[in-house]
């Protein structure tokens, strides 16, 4: 069979490293050739984020070395009003996040699911009822898939056909009905964007029985990549668990053998979701009580937690992510799994009220990084696993007015249109780039060679000025070090380019400054959520 471009490229690269043509710092040739790309399920279209938070999440994921994101595309939102309309607000949201991801070097995978009521056998159903129903006419799904593939042509690595179609929460139809939408979507997508991969709907757990049923129904010619969601059950099991059950990552080996048997030995497997949730467990798992992987309700009186809802500690969550990628890499090398993408679920903790589903995120609700983020960043970039301090600025969010900032009242005002919280700063710059600047109170360095990082957000009241973020180090009144970075801002909240500085002295202090660079700039800009962190 003809090798895929990615596999051929990886094979050539591995051979080149093995031959000594390129230096290998820490990874062996086999590691380079077989480590999956690591990505994140990114709920960019959900309503609990604003645009600034969507971009902030992408910035942080890019800093962590994330290589691909999976974004859900709700058919029920794209065509909520009927088959001939496309919701501009929803497409605008997708455009914003897809373009922003690609601008940061992150690939985008799109997953299309959620049937609109008009397309079902019950057009008066609520959207919640209609969402998992199979479309009455599979051609409706094929048409929207083709239209979207043309609209986003060249901007996505693939289209995943539904989410967890083996789970009634997401698909209430039969396997045969699922294959019908797969057959409708494949030619439509390929006609619109021949380079986009068509990905089978990622299964809830490693469900080889469902996958074999699809093969028996003739699915093989209608997908390019096999997707799986290999969560663990009990959900606190470590990634390397090999117990012969389907509720483990190790069960992917059975799917690989199944694919090979049906002639798909060259097709890649993508984990379009995997992960662990960080929360405490009030009860032991039901496996301990019942001796099997039964999903029992807490109301049964036996005092156990569903195997699918067991949590891990915050540190274990990060460790398990890294160990899962390492485990799959070894299996790629030893058993030929050919898993080429692994996407962590998910970007940010949720607010559903379900403690298990709410705590998979890399970030907390306030967008601060959980330990899993730092483990991911260290693994992908080689950065230190050391986490930053709490914010060294006493009033970085301006919730206490101008306290902690050195500026006259005419230069710094306090407004209520904040990025987060209830208040933000408003800086009026009169063009004097020497004196009209915003300055935070000094912070002691404590030691030579300490790494500090400055972050913040700004928005222009008018125009699009360039803002300079500056750290100045002084000892006994003398400047001993300085670093700056420039960001162009617009009318919406913009995350300023972060600034890293290493202290030159231990008997010194740092001052963070912000100023507009344009001479004669007489407008104003807003500032909020400034942080100075020590590593």
Image (cartoon, rainbow, N blue to C red):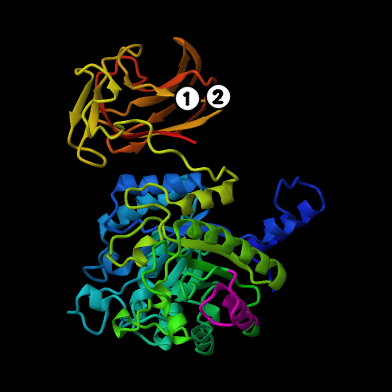
**Whole-percent x, y for residue 189 in the image:** 45, 68
Q: Is residue 189 visible?
A: yes
Label total for image? 2
Q: Quadrant of residue 425?
A: top left
**Mark seen at residue 448:** 2
**Whole-percent x, y for residue 305 in the image:** 38, 76
Label 1 sits on a secondary structure element that is: loop
**Vertical position of residue 312 compared to residue 266: above or below:** above
Residue sticking out furthest to the right: 19
Does 248 lie within the magenta span? yes
Tell me: 91 left or right of 476: left
Magenta-highlighted residues:
240-260
Q: Quadrant of residue 91?
A: bottom left
Does 68 lie within the magenta span? no
Label 1–label 2 contact, CB within 8 A: yes
Residue sticking out furthest to the top: 477
**Whole-percent x, y for residue 408 in the image:** 23, 16
**Vertical position of residue 163 compared to residue 425: above or below:** below
Give the class, few, some or many, for how many residues have Cα within 10 Å of label 2's Cα (few <14, many ≥20): few
Distance of label 1 from label 2 (alpha carbons): 7 Å
Residue positioned 34% across, 32% down in the render = 489
Q: Nearer the viewer, residue 288 or 185?
A: 288
**Mark seen at residue 445:** 1
Q: Quadrant of residue 328?
A: bottom right
Give the class, few, some or many, for how many residues have Cα within 10 Å of label 1's Cα (few <14, many ≥20): many
Label 2 sits on a secondary structure element that is: loop
Residue positioned 25% across, 78% down in the render = 130
Q: Is residue 164 visible?
A: no
Residue positioned 48% across, 60% down in the render = 317
Q: Nearer the viewer, residue 348 or 292?
A: 292
């Amino acid at each position: 069979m003809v090798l895929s471009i990615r596999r051929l490229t990886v094979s050539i690269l591995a051979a080149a490293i093995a031959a000594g043509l390129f230096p290998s710092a820490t990874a062996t040739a086999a590691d380079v050739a077989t480590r999956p790309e690591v990505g994140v399920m990114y709920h960019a279209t959900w309503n609990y984020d604003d645009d600034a938070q969507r971009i902030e999440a992408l910035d942080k994921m890019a800093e962590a070395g994330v290589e691909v994101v999976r974004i859900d595309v709700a058919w029920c939102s794209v065509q909520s009003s009927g088959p001939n309309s496309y919701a501009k607000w929803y497409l605008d949201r997708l455009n914003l996040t897809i373009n922003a991801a690609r601008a940061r070097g992150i690939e985008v995978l799109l997953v299309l699911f959620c049937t609109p009521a008009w397309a079902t056998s019950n057009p008066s159903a609520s959207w919640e009822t209609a969402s998992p129903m199979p479309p009455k006419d599979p051609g409706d799904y094929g048409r929207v898939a083709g239209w979207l593939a043309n609209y986003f042509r060249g901007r996505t690595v693939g289209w995943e056909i539904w989410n967890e179609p083996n789970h009634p929460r997401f698909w209430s139809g039969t396997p045969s009905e699922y294959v019908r939408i797969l057959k409708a979507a494949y030619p439509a997508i390929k006609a619109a964007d021949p380079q986009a991969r068509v990905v089978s709907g990622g299964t809830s757990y490693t469900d080889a029985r469902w996958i074999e049923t699809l093969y028996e129904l003739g699915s093989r010619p209608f997908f390019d990549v096999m997707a799986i969601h290999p969560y663990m059950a009990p959900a606190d099991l470590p990634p390397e668990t090999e117990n012969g059950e389907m509720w483990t990552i190790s069960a992917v080996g059975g799917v690989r053998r199944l694919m090979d048997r049906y002639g798909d030995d060259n097709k890649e497997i993508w984990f379009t979701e995997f992960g662990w949730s960080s929360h405490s467990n009030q009860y032991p798992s039901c496996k301990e009580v019942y001796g099997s992987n039964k999903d029992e309700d807490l109301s049964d009186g036996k005092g156990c937690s569903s195997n699918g809802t067991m949590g891990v500690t915050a540190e274990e969550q990060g460790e398990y992510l890294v160990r899962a990628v390492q485990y799959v890499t070894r299996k790629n090398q030893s058993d030929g799994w050919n898993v080429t993408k692994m996407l962590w679920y998910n970007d940010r903790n949720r607010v559903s009220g379900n403690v298990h589903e709410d705590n998979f995120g890399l970030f907390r609700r306030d967008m601060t990084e959980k330990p899993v983020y730092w483990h991911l960043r260290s693994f992908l970039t080689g950065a230190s696993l050391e986490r930053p301090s709490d914010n060294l600025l006493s009033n970085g969010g301006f919730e206490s007015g101008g306290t902690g900032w050195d500026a006259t009242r005419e230069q710094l005002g306090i407004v209520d249109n904040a990025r987060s919280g209830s208040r933000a700063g408003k800086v009026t710059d009169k063009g004097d780039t020497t004196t009209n600047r915003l300055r935070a109170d000094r912070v002691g360095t404590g030691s030579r060679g300490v790494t500090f990082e400055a972050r913040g957000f700004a928005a222009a009241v008018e125009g699009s000025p360039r803002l300079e973020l500056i750290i100045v180090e002084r000892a006994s009144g003398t400047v001993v070090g300085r670093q700056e970075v420039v960001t162009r801002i617009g009318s919406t909240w913009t995350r300023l380019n972060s600034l890293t500085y290493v202290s030159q002295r231990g008997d010194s202090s740092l001052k963070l400054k912000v100023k507009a660079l344009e001479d004669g700039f007489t407008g104003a800009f807003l500032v909020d959520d400034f942080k100075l962190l020590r590593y």
